Amino acid sequence: MVKHTEEATSAWVVETSKKVNAAKGSDYVELDQGLMTVDQIDAVFNCLPLELITIDKEDRYVYCNNEIPKKKLLSPRWPERLGQTLTEVHKSSSMPHVQAIMDYAKTGKTYRLIRPSDEVYMVASFKDMRDKNGNYAGVTEWIVDLLPIINRYLEQTGQKLVPDETKTTADVSSGASKQS
């Protein structure tokens, strides 16, 4: 796990936490299916072997977990960027694509971006969040490298991946796949 430091946290997090008197540390939070402390919730999110990013209903970047080192992130977003909007986080040239992903995710379907290579098979998934009344609450993005899982499966079963002789080339440049 990457060590979290207050210096790396955006001023927005610090200021907003004080303003709303945010729960922290050993404070309990009542959840739909349980009761946990903030420290326990942080531990759960930070032990997941994936990147977890949350965008709120105002398209503001409000959360990222600390499990993956910066240099290995598929889509680096730093704690110091928390509180910024998507237009502040992303380059203007990428905003049409970012907005298309957000618009699709807001429909309730999961949008997936896949980046395969010899070293990683990264899958980024974007899904809308809804409150108990069904109102839009934001989008969660999770990014996972499936290659270690695939390799472990192949190792355990003695199977191999082999080229599909019926295909001439793999299409890895046409864009993201959309799945519901």
Image (cartoon, rainbow, N blue to C red):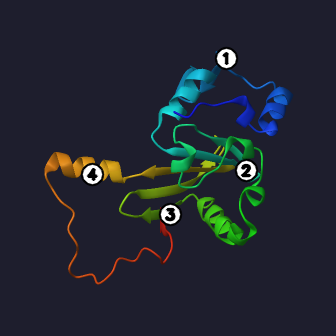
Alpha carbon distance from label 2 to label 3: 21 Å
Q: Quadrant of residue 103?
A: bottom right
- Which label number is shown at residue 124? none
Q: Amino acid at mark 4?
A: Asn
Tell me the crowding category of disc 4: few under 14, some 14 to 19, or many 20 or more residues within 10 angstroms, Cα based.
some
- Point out residue 28 in the picture as x, y percentages from the top left corner: 64, 18
- Which label number is shown at residue 151? 4
- Secondary structure type for disc 4: helix
Which callout, 1 or 2, points at the residue further toward the start of the chain? 1
Q: Amino acid at mark 3?
A: Leu
- Secondary structure type for disc 1: loop
Of the pair 34 and 51, the residue shown nearer to us: 51
Instruction: Tell me if residue 42 comes above or below residue 139 in the rendering.
Output: above
> Residue at 72% of width from left, 30% of height from top?
6
Q: Nearer the viewer, mark 2 or mark 4?
A: 4
Q: Nearer the viewer, mark 1 or mark 3?
A: 3
Residue that carries the numbered disc 1 in the rendered image: 27
Tell me the crowding category of disc 3: few under 14, some 14 to 19, or many 20 or more residues within 10 angstroms, Cα based.
some
Q: Nearer the viewer, mark 4 or mark 1?
A: 4
Q: Amino acid at mark 2?
A: Lys
Which callout, 1 or 3, points at the residue further toward the start of the chain? 1
Residue that carries the numbered disc 2 in the rendered image: 57
Tell me the crowding category of disc 2: few under 14, some 14 to 19, or many 20 or more residues within 10 angstroms, Cα based.
some
Alpha carbon distance from label 2 to label 4: 38 Å
Residue that carries the numbered disc 3 in the rendered image: 113
> Residue at 77% of width from left, 39% of height from top?
10
Alpha carbon distance from label 4 to label 1: 41 Å
Drawn side of residue 122 relative to residue 129, left or right: left
- Secondary structure type for disc 2: loop
